[in-house]
Image: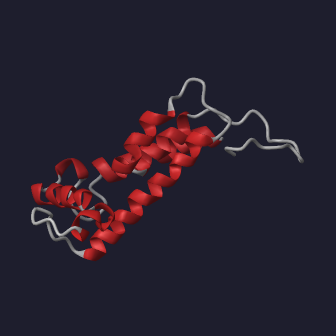
């Protein structure tokens, strides 16, 4: 049930964000060039690092938009915890998924959850974990 639920959730999410006319505003695939420029400016200003150094070429962006952008990217960075799990996926390489998650967030995360292999069985009570876990 878990993999199929994640697969359906991924398909619905990608449809809603990239294709559907239901949400307000333009579809992602029909984005205004100004929106794409804003996304690039937010990426350059990531975590307010470059504006701190007062580079003249760094665009000035609304700080609230930067905060939301930074939150979303930080959320996806938490997924790097999957990379350290002892139950490594045999047929699914994690690094390509992780490299796309900061850019497309849940549009990549949900398909990853649908594609990954389920756990064989839970750890028995009292089982020792290794240093990474």
Q: Measuring 23% from the left and 53% from the top, which residue is drawn there?
A: 27
Query: Toward the viewer: 114 or 71?
Result: 71
The image position of residue 97, as x and y in percent, is 44, 38
The front one of 86 and 117 is 86
- Classify residue 122 by image quadrant: top right
* Rendering quarter of residue 1: top right
Picture layout, residue 55 above or below residue 17: below
Where does the image place residue 69, in percent across and percent down from the top left? 33, 64
Residue lying at the far right of the rendered structure? 126
Is 17 left or right of 124, judged from the image as shown?
A: left
Q: Which of 92 and 24 is in front in this view?
A: 92
On the rendered structure, is 45 left or right of 15? left
Identity of the residue drawn at 48% across and 40% down: 111
How far across and down, in percent of the image, does residue 43 sit? 26, 57
At 71% from the left edge and 44% from the top edge, which residue is drawn?
131
In the picture as drawn, the residue positioned furthest to the front comes out as: 53
Image coords of residue 102 (percent x, y)? 38, 50
Structure colour scheme: secondary structure
Q: Which residue is drawn at 52% across and 47% down?
A: 80
Instruction: Please state which of residues 127 and 26 is positioned toward the viewer in this rendering.
Output: 127
Image: 48 above or below 105:
below
Is residue 73 shown left or right of residue 21? right
How many numbered tags mark residues here?
Answer: 0
């Amino acid at each position: 049930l878990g993999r199929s639920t994640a697969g359906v959730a991924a398909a619905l999410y990608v449809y809603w964000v990239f294709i559907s006319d239901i949400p307000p505003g333009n579809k992602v695939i029909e984005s205004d060039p100004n929106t794409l420029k804003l996304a690039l400016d937010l990426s350059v200003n990531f975590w307010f690092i470059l504006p701190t150094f007062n580079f003249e070429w760094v665009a000035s962006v609304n700080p609230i938009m930067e905060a939301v952008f930074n939150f979303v990217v930080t959320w996806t960075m938490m997924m790097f915890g999957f990379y350290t799990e002892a139950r490594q996926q045999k047929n699914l390489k994690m690094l390509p998924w992780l490299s796309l998650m900061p850019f497309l967030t849940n549009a990549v995360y949900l398909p990853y959850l649908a594609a990954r292999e389920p756990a064989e069985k839970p750890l028995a009570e009292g089982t020792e974990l290794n240093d990474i876990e």
